[in-house]
């Protein structure tokens, strides 16, 4: 099924006057009649085709405001776009990523970048076919952590928004990314994509109907109603499209890299890769704890970073004790 078709079928209720849902009315219904289950209340209000909205209300508390709900659904739609190699804008975003990191690459890779980029000056700017693909992308893909020389295939799970995050990180976290790219054993691209994918699932920002099984198979749990409520509150407070989500992923990514660096073992490629996945789970659990305990007047990004830094500080102290 094409994304556009799927997106139309799951269009938010708030964009449809004929199915407009006043969430406050739903709150009042539950207060007046606590014996009624959510399944008895919601189907009379939701369109059968609006799977996400039905799932959302079945899983989340009714104490979200209309504004929070609208922002939440908008964010979900923003990050649900699949990567399309035939879309010039998508391909341009991929090219932009490699251009954004050219000054952050290790010296050997910088020289290679310049040589390849010079050879591409006479090529067509269109890079959306395998035959005319940009040589720079092919040459550097594995070096920045993609699985092969065609990075497009890695966006299948997280979609376009994982690439948008990578561009965000390359723009606002240059110092951190420069350190990450120096480590030839750390999979920056795959880690970014996996973090983007799992955070999307645990926050219910997904169209996938079997996402609970996916999380369970990776030893992850869906976030609670309380955690979702707190995230929605901070989403409303920030009101900056995808930036809050990108900031969260950025802090998690930096944490994963630092902890991975502490645990890296020479000659154990497979074990090191598995460590990345286990550290991702730790970072997401820390995000869950942050959302459990955060207050409205606190900054979600700052609170998450502090919690992640505490883990690293405790770990570094233990490392020093072992050395001494």
Image: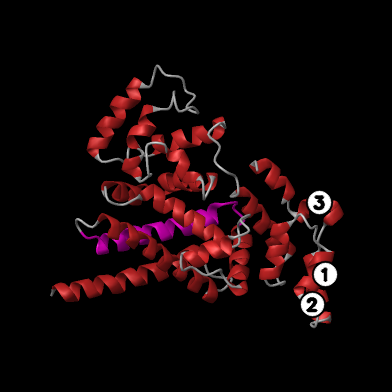
* Residue 45 belongs to the span the image colors magenta: no
Residue 305's spot in the image, x, y percent? Answer: 42, 65
Residue position for label 2: 30
Displayed quadrant of residue 138: top left
- Label 1 secondary element: helix
Helix, strand or loop at mark 3: loop
Q: Is residue 59 above or below residue 143?
A: below
- Residue behind mark 1: 25
Residue 54 position, x and y percent, is 73, 63
In the orientation shown, which residue stands out farthest toward the bottom? 35
Q: Position of residue 317 (x, y in %)?
A: 24, 74
Count neighbours of disc 2 (C-alpha within 10 A) and say few if under 14, some if 14 to 19, many if 20 or more.
Answer: some
Residue at position x 47%, y 27% from top?
Answer: 127
N-terminal of the pair, mark 3 or mark 1, is 3
Q: Earlier in the sequence, mark 3 or mark 2?
A: 3
Res. 16 mark: 3
Which of the two residues, 212 or 90, is positioned nearer the viewer here? 212
């Amino acid at each position: 099924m094409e994304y556009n078709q799927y997106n139309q079928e799951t269009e938010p209720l708030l964009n449809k006057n004929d199915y407009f849902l006043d969430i406050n009315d739903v709150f009042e219904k539950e207060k007046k009649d606590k014996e009624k289950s959510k399944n008895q209340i919601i189907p009379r209000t939701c369109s059968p085709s609006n799977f996400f909205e039905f799932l959302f209300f079945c899983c989340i508390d009714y104490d979200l405001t209309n504004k929070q709900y609208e922002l939440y659904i908008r964010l979900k739609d923003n990050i649900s776009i699949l990567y399309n190699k035939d879309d010039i804008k998508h391909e341009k975003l991929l090219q932009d990523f490699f251009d954004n990191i050219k000054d952050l690459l290790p010296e050997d890779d910088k020289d290679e970048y310049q040589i390849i980029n010079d050879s591409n000056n006479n090529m067509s700017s269109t890079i959306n076919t395998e035959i005319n693909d940009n040589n720079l992308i092919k040459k550097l893909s594995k070096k920045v952590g993609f699985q092969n020389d065609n990075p497009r295939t890695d966006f299948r799970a997280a979609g376009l928004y994982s690439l948008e995050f990578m561009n965000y990180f390359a723009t606002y976290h240059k110092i951190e990314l420069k350190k990450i790219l120096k480590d030839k054993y750390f999979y920056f691209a795959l880690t970014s994509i996996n973090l983007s994918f799992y955070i999307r699932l645990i926050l219910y920002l997904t169209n996938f109907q079997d996402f609970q099984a996916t999380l369970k198979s990776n030893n992850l749990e869906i976030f609670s109603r309380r955690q979702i409520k707190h995230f929605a509150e901070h989403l409303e407070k920030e009101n900056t499209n995808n930036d809050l989500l990108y900031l969260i992923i950025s802090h998690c990514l930096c944490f994963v890299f630092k902890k991975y660096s502490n645990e890296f073992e020479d000659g154990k490629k497979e074990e090191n890769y598995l460590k990345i996945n286990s550290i991702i789970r730790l970072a997401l659990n820390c995000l869950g704890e942050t959302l459990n305990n955060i207050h409205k007047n606190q900054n979600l990004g700052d609170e998450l970073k502090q919690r992640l830094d505490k883990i690293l500080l405790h770990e570094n102290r233990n490392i020093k004790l072992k050395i001494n």
